[in-house]
Image (spheres, helix red, strand yellow):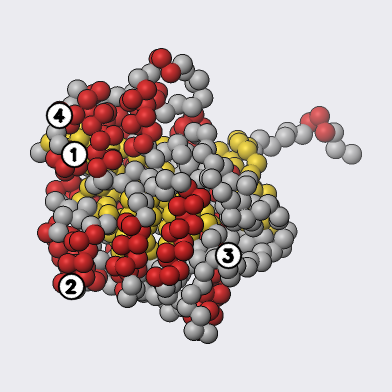
Amino acid sequence: MHDPSLMKRDDSDYVFYELTRSICPDCRKTIDASILLRDNKVYMRKRCPEHGVFESLVYADAQAYCASSKFNKPGSIPLAHSTSVVNGCPSDCGLCPDHQQHACVGIIEVNSACNMNCPLCFAKAAAGFNLTLQNVEAILDHFVETEGNAEVVQFSGGEPTIHPEIIPMLRAAKARNIRHVMLNTNGKRIAHDDVFLEQLAELRPAIYFQFDGFERRTYEVLRGEPDILEEKLRALDRLATIGCHVVLVPAVERGVNDHEVGRIVKFALEHPAIRGVNFQPAFHSGRFGLHDPLQRMTIPDILRALELQTEGLFTYGDFIPIPCCFPTCNSVTYAYVDGETVTPLTRLLEVDDYLDYLANRAVVDLDIEIKTALEALWSTSAVPGADKTASDFAVTCAACGLPGGDLSLSELTSRLFVVMLQDFMDPWTFNQKNVMKCCKAILLPDGKQIPFCAYNSVGYREQVRKQLAARNGTGRHSVGNSQPLTFSFPH
Ligand code: SF4
Ligand code: SF4
Ligand code: SF4
């Protein structure tokens, strides 16, 4: 008989940090998940009774992940909810009364088709449905009803610029006094269509522009079009001629274009139309499912690459999490640009002190005007190029002793530069804790608002596509609030 006192217990090679809920990447059933810390990285491990154990990298800096809880700002609850709590999160979207944040950004996918066929497409763009102008007007009215002062509406797809009614849709959003109207695009139509460019000049939406780098291989792997760079550069130059403000949106995949992030920022700093870059680690939903979940890019990976590749123009420490959503979802920094000199605000101002929601510091300790301006800037609803963003920036410039406070808003807009990182979750990394405080929602024709990562990971997207396509197919193009979309999920 063996003697237990002579045996040695094994130590695990990780710290068990917390328990949360996620989904099985295979069957999408909701299951428990553990967050583990190992070698200063954060992993999610979960077990589906049917499909086994899954582990994925979530955040490549465990210390920053744990420290980020101080940036978790109390949520602001929407004026009205569109669903009730029935089966529990994430099956009740939404927004249901359990949701912890209003929708800072509402996204309307006006179609499912695209003029590209990217291998990386999380929307799996293909023929399916087109919303009508009437649908979009009803969606916008409902958004204003639930938000009061609706902040940002983003038109997306598919490729929204190929929708025949995209211009009246943009106009309808502007007519409702929604503070910022944005258009997501791959740039193809803008590169070639003079009439469309003229129409955009009249409305001047903020442009979120797909731009992944400069190399043929980058575009071949991510977009299936190795020679598309020239078209993109042409579109950007044309946007500059009509005074549209642009944010570049690169999807970053390890071993594909992670060596191009510095060059993208340097290019953006010099281009007259570009006000910032929004890096998104590639996430593996839709057409881009196959990958090694332990090797995915995360926010800290891109920050380290940026520091190295910009020779310190932007450093890891310049970036601070965004507090309105869950703090590990996004990080951002703002810089004042004067010729060759780029000064991130965070080097002159203790931004993290102002955005610390655990310290319980008395308001008298902090200048409330600066705190309010920083909260507006460190929000997913801040839009580079907008006057509101420039005026918030002016307050912080004055506090830092930068000359920005003395400039006109349009001059300041051209000196303000934003670098943001946004790590969308996929079925491997899906964390219910994050999605319950998500501040980006897909706005649907029946009034539902579904948090972006739930929409793409849990199975909403597929079910919406099928139902809207069936309605288009029967000629019932108007899919207003009276016809609820229905969802079913494995339990
Ligand atoms: S993600 Fe939000 S809206 Fe959706 S079920 Fe969970 S709490 Fe409700
Ligand atoms: S990723 Fe964008 S541009 Fe590419 S196919 Fe999908 S919707 Fe179209
Ligand atoms: S969209 Fe996803 S990554 Fe962004 S705030 Fe919502 S849950 Fe977080």
What is the x, y in percent for residue 288? 45, 66
As drawn, is 391 to the left or to the right of 480?
left
**How would you rate the neighbour count of disc 4 (Cα within 10 Å): few for under 14, some for 14-19, many for 20 or more?**
few
Secondary structure, mark 4, is helix
Q: Relative to 289, does residue 377 appear above or below in the rendering?
A: above
Secondary structure, mark 1, is helix
Structural distance between the alpha carbons of marks 4 and 3: 50 Å
The residue at which mark 2 appears reads as 195
Q: Which mark is residue 409?
A: 1
As drawn, is 188 to the left or to the right of 129?
left
Q: Amino acid at mark 1?
A: Leu
Q: Are marks 4 and 3 in contact (CB under 8 Å)?
A: no
- Looking at the image, the residue that sits furthest to the right is 1
Structural distance between the alpha carbons of marks 1 and 4: 9 Å
The residue at which mark 3 appears reads as 459
Q: Quadrant of the N terminus?
A: top right
**How would you rate the neighbour count of disc 2 (Cα within 10 Å): few for under 14, some for 14-19, many for 20 or more?**
few
Give the quadrant of residue 51: bottom right
As drawn, is 364 to the left or to the right of 342?
right
Structural distance between the alpha carbons of marks 1 and 2: 29 Å
What is the x, y in percent for residue 56? 54, 51
Upstream in the sequence, badge 1 or badge 3?
1
**In this view of the protein, which residue sits in the foreground, 139 or 370?**
139
Q: Amino acid at mark 4?
A: Asp
Q: Relative to 356, does residue 470 appear above or below in the rendering?
A: below
Count how many numbered circles sit on residues in the image: 4
Q: Which mark is residue 406?
A: 4
Secondary structure, mark 2, is helix
**How would you rate the neighbour count of disc 3 (Cα within 10 Å): few for under 14, some for 14-19, many for 20 or more?**
some
Kindly identify the residue that appears in the image at 26 percent across and 28 percent down. Answer: 395
